[in-house]
Every structure is written in C-alpha cells, then in structure tokens.
Image (spheres, rainbow, N blue to C red):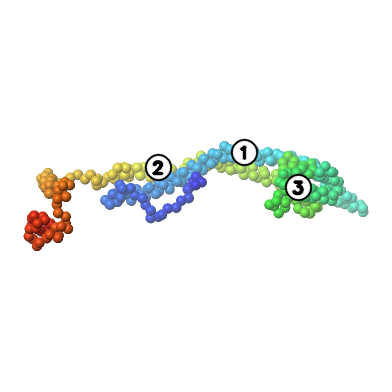
Amino acid sequence: MSSKSPVRSCEDVDETALSYAEIKALCAGNPLIAEKMNLDVEAAKLRMLKADHQSQHYRLEDELLRGYPEKIIFFKERIAGMEKDIILYNSQSEKLTAVQESMTGGAASASLKFPGMTVNGVEYKDKEPAAKALLETCKKVKDRTETPVGEYMGFKMSIQFEATSVYQFKLHLRGNMTYQLDLGTDAFGNITRINNTLADLPKRLESAQSQLDGILSQQEAAKQELEKPFAQESELAEKEARLALLNADLNIDGDGGFDVMNDTDSRTENAVEIDAETDSEYESDYEPQTVSEKSTKPSILERIENFDGGKYNSVSGRKSSERDIS
C-alpha cells in the first residue's frame, strides 16, 4: 500500500501454484522441475533486494538534489543569524553587570542588574514593575496569533497563547533569528528564563554547527553509497540465466516437453483397419431412431405388463425376452 521496498508480505507456506506443464513434468519424474522451483524462489528474493537497492538509490538522488542542499542552506543561514545575535547580546550584556567596591577598600564585587525592558510602549527601569507588566500582558492574549509586547536587550518580544501546553504562553525573542521560551505564573521567574535563553545562544550556535557538520557528512556518505552497484547482481544474473535454460529444456511455455494430448498412434496398419471396422459395425447397431419409430415402439412399462414367460403377446407381436424388458 505504501509502495515502499522491500515489500512486507505473507503467504501460505504450502501454497505452490504449478502450471499444467509443471504438473506434467512432475508426473513424469523430471528432476529439473524441482531445481526450477527452487531457482524461482531464490531469484524472486534477489529481485526484491535489487528493487530495494534501486529504491534507495532513487531516495539518495532526491536527497542529493534537493534534501541536503536545502538543509545546508537552512543551517548556514541560521548559524549566520545566531552569530549576529550573539554579537548583539554581548553588546547589551554590559548593562547586566554592576561593579561595586567594598567599603573597607577590599576587592570589588560584581552583581547583576536589570538592563531595562519596554512593555506595551512603556519603558521600565526596574525589574519588578517590568516583570509584572509582562505577566499582565500574558493574561490579555487569548489566541495563537503572536502579539508584540515590547523589547528587551535589543530583541523584539511577542507572546503567543498555546492551550495544549503546560505553559500556556510562549514568548518569542526575535533578533536576526527567533528563539522561543515558556512563560509561567512567576513574574521574576519569567525574567530569569529570558536571561537564560539569551545566555545560551553560544550553545545553540554550537549545536547548529554540529548539525550542519552531520548533514555534510551524510551528504558525502550518500554520494559514496550512490556509486555502489547491487552487491548480488552477478548471482541474480547467474540464476536468471539458469532459469532460462531450464524453461527452455522443460518447454514451460509450450506443453512442458511431454506430449500427452497428441500422442502418436503406435498401432499397426492392420490393427487400425480392424478397429475401424469394429467401430463402423458398432455405429450401425446403434443408429439413431427417428421420432416416428420411437413413438410406435412399446414403452418399457408396456413390455413388462405384457410379458408372458417367453410367448408371443398381442402388443409387441413377437416373442418377449429379457432383452425386451431391459
């Protein structure tokens, strides 16, 4: 049904369909017929393997022509976009760090600070009001359409409602590429998730580069596989050649090499003449009767009723006998 090879099939192990010629060959005790049947099974399996090999070649050709080039272009564009986003994030990350010097003149300490967020056109300098404004905006989103809500560290933000997810709201951070994360009910936790997503951009870039390397390796392996011929081609050709010889010897396409219906007449001429005379006498004794003759001849029931033990009766006008009754 799926047109894929090898085909998954099942059949009765005892079901063997023989042609009339093969049955005649079996009855004649010809040993070649057993060899032919075994070769038929083996050749059929090899043909199936060859068909699967050809199908794989067709799929590889499609992948080399369209599949792999499209994937390579996609990941190259994604890598280039992520590299630009990392540069953008690094340029904004300085806003996250605040350096504080110790009162005692000791070593300075660094702490994270809020870089500011724009929500629905309002710019928030502090973390708490920005987080609450973002959470209140989520409550107003009721469908899967992306709703723009603001900007954070140079990335555009939009919210999408997802009813089938545990986290019903998705936040999209869009720079040169788009990054998706889940929003929960904790206002400060949402800010932490956004920061973690942006901080993981180098890891995402590394993963995309690994995927691209894998696709390039698959493309090269596909090219090498495409050059390989069918490994059992010689075996299949040998078996098919042998099958052709067996079919010719058995005359499978004709009468199987055993003339049953048109046997030659081995009788002598004298025997043929005697048989012909016997046949003609037999036909004369049993000439077909006309309708009038059948109507005047007494029925079997009448002959039984008028049987008088061998004497002549008035109905038939002749002597009754067992032959008349029969």
Q: Earlier in the sequence, mark 3 or mark 1?
A: 1
**SS assignment at label 1:** helix
The residue at the far bottom in this view is 309
Q: Of discs 3 and 2, which sits in the foreground?
A: 3
Q: Disc 1 marks which residue?
A: 70
Residue at x-position 14% and y-position 48%: 293
Please give left or right for residue 258 compared with residue 69 in the image.
Answer: left
Q: Inspect the image, locate mark 3, and give the three-letter code of the amino acid beneath it.
A: Val
Label of residue 55 in the image: none
Residue at x-position 46% and y-position 44%: 50
Residue at x-position 43% and y-position 48%: 45
The residue at the far right in this view is 104
Number of other residues with Cα within 10 Å of mark 3, as a class: few under 14, some 14 to 19, many 20 or more: some
Distance CA(mark 2)–CA(mark 1): 39 Å
**SS assignment at label 2:** helix
Q: Disc 2 marks which residue?
A: 237
Distance CA(mark 3)–CA(mark 2): 68 Å
Rendering coords of residue 28 (x, y %): 26, 51
Rendering coords of residue 24 (x, y %): 28, 49
Rendering coords of residue 235 (x, y %): 41, 45
Which of these two is toward me, 293 or 218? 293
Please give left or right for residue 57 compared with residue 258 in the image.
Answer: right
The residue at the far top in this view is 65
Residue at x-position 12% and y-position 59%: 306
Please give left or right for residue 217 compared with residue 58 in the image.
Answer: right
Q: Inspect the image, locate mark 2, and give the three-letter code of the amino acid beneath it.
A: Ala
Number of other residues with Cα within 10 Å of mark 2, as a class: few under 14, some 14 to 19, many 20 or more: few
Q: Of discs 2 and 1, which sits in the foreground?
A: 1
Q: Of discs 3 and 1, which sits in the foreground?
A: 3
Q: Earlier in the sequence, mark 3 or mark 2?
A: 3
Rendering coords of residue 237 (x, y %): 40, 42
Label of residue 141 in the image: 3
